[in-house]
Image (tube, rainbow, N blue to C red):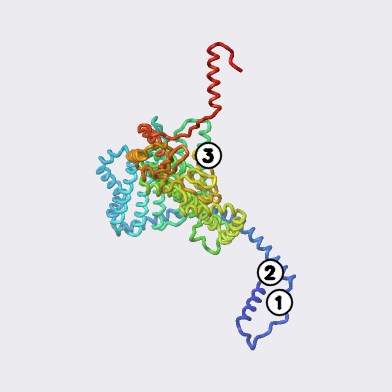
Amino acid sequence: MGRISAIGICGIMMLLSLFSAVHAQTMPPAADAIPPPAQVRQMMELMQTPEVKQWMATQMAAPAAQTTDQEEMSVLSGRLEHARRHIAMVSGAAMTLPSEVAQASSLVMSELHDAGPLRMAAQFLVLLIAGFIVEIVVRRAVRERRERAAQMTGTRLAARIIPAFVFALATGLALVIFNWPPISQNIAIALAIALVVQRFAVSIGGVIVDLVTLPRGEGETVAVDAAVAQFWFRRCALFVIYFIFGWVILQSMEPLGYSMAARYLVGYILGIGLFLIATEAVWSRPGNETRHRHVINWLLILYFLLLWGIWVLSFDWLLWVCIYLLLLPKVLSVSTLAVKSFHQAEAGFLAQRHIATVLLDRGVRALIIALAAIWLGHVLGVETAMMMTSNETMVDRITRGTIGGVVILLAADLLWHLVRAYIDGKLLASPVDGIVSDDEKVKRARLQTLLPIFRNILAVVIVVIAALMVLSGLGIEIGPLIAGAGVVGVAVGFGAQTIVKDVISGMFYLWDDAFRVGEYIESGSHKGVVEAFSLRSVKLRHHRGPLTTVPFGELGAVKNLNRDWTIDKISLNVTYDTDLVKTKKIIKQIGQQLLDNPEWGPNIIETLKMKGVEQFGEFAIEIRLSMMTKPGEQFVIRRNALAMIRNAFKENGIEFAVPTVQVSGDREIEASVAAARYAAQAHSGGEPPA
């Protein structure tokens, strides 16, 4: 105690000295200021020495550490004390509950006397049955249409949801059209909410049952047996209806003047009914009798009893964590199973609707997890609006950041899959090899080139932004992180100049529209059809099959062989006695035949024609032919044109010139004489000459 007192006195003196220094700087010195006593001046001089300052810092740090340990221990003891006070409060409510019931009864009777008992009974009766009556009328009015659409899965599922909306509208209208006294109004609002919630719960449960029991193949197999699905549907519906109307009772007790302790007591008593419903469902659940079945049943019952005990002890956060551990995996598995069944039932409907498919696959799962995380944050009291305060602790910040991070990552995952589905749908809907016009082919080729690059960039952007948002939610300053990343990026850029060069070169190639997917290009020793891109390279498929990955920085000058048009030139050698005028007419006829052909004609811009004599050779006249076609089509047209030229020349007596070799001189004469002599000798039967 003496040490603490000394520290306190020293602290007060330091504050006084600090205040005195500030006051002396801001206020002019008074003429009649009284100088401090000698003892005070001596104490202030001692406080300025290094030894005293070090001792004071050490003494102030030790209690701070002790205070932290005490705070950590006080958290556990505080929770235990809170549970004790809560049990004592609820136990005490059992004694005061009869008097509170009498007081509430007097309030109800007083209000009924003022408003009229029959009138209030009629209003509550209309509120209870209005939704059901209107729903029955609407069902009968559209019965024939529902029967015609009963075989369509989407219509059959909508037939369960639309009546719930009709029920909600009718119930809301019944609530609005009547004048309610204050207490009855609160009870009526809670009752209307309960009716609508239970109706939607039953409708959604019916939709899930329809989905998981749909046939999944030709063998009429289903994902879940219909009897099993109906069993769990009835138990879950009973659980939800009991829960929601128990909530109505608790909400109605507040305007009737019941204390908080009494409401807790009634809630815990109603919770026993939930425990009994869950216990009955566990023991009577369908399934094969196995050796471990009873053990699992008892473990589940003990788990439910543990949940009820945690609830009574008012450990709300632990209660919801235990509920999530039990229910969240089951809810996710059932939702996944329902989505898969809907996919198989509506495969034709979802085939061309990629966005709807992603929303079903990822959106349902993300929505369930996000709602669970947000509700857990609400239970823990870590809402964003309440946590942005100066007294926020590290645990609160981490908890809020974790819950927010889960939601952010789920949203980023859903956004990425939506973007990818949209881009992939555009790519599938824009094939380059379809029967379309030239302008449309150019547009589609550009889409096939740029969209994959844009998709990769978006993936990087979404990942980076999501990561920064998660770190910011955890309380980490992302400003220095971004600055450090910039410095590291510059260092990496200097160390990876080749990669940076490839990426920047690729950006300029795409900006200049130098080539597109599906075009044949040549660059140095590389040539082939462009198959795909990445951020730093292009993949070229050679016409013989090999696939070459070329970095953009190594491409250099690019020769594109598939842009606009191409001119193909053909050289022919004919003999010197060829009629060139006749030859030109024959070539012109062949060009017209090519133009009239339905397969080749659309790809010909300028048909085959004879340009004239190119030159006189040593053994032939060389004539030059040419034609202009669309890129890539000249090879097929050239082959067919050459075959037609060969046949036409043969029919009209035009011969192709070929080089010949003539041998003459004394050796030829000698060879002829020797051959004649050999033949004569062989005829006479003599020996051939040497």
Task: Assess disc 1: are there few (<14), some (14-19) or many (≥20) residues with their C-alpha within 10 Å of its C-alpha.
Answer: some
Please tell me whether mark 1 or mark 3 is closer to you in this view. 3
Residue 376 shows up from this direction: no
In the picture as drawn, the residue positioned furthest to the bottom comes out as: 31
Identify the mark at residue 207; answer none if there is no mark: none
The residue wearing badge 3 is 546
243 vs 302, left or right, is left
Q: Residue drawn at (52%, 62%), measured in percent from left and top? A: 388
Q: Residue drawn at (45%, 44%), measured in percent from left and top? A: 518
Taking depth in this image into account, of 483 and 394 the one nearest to the observer is 483
Residue 300, how many percent across, how many down? 51, 40
Q: Which quarter of the picture shows residue 488? A: bottom right
The residue wearing badge 1 is 44
Whether label 3 touches label 2, CB < 8 Å: no
Distance, label 3 to label 2, CA atoms, is 83 Å
Taking depth in this image into account, of 230 and 394 the one nearest to the observer is 394
Q: Tell me which amino acid carries mark 2.
A: Ile
What secondary structure is marked by label 3?
loop
Sequence-earlier tag: 1 or 2: 2
The residue wearing badge 2 is 7
Quick one: quadrant of the N terminus? bottom right
Distance, label 1 to label 2, CA atoms, is 15 Å
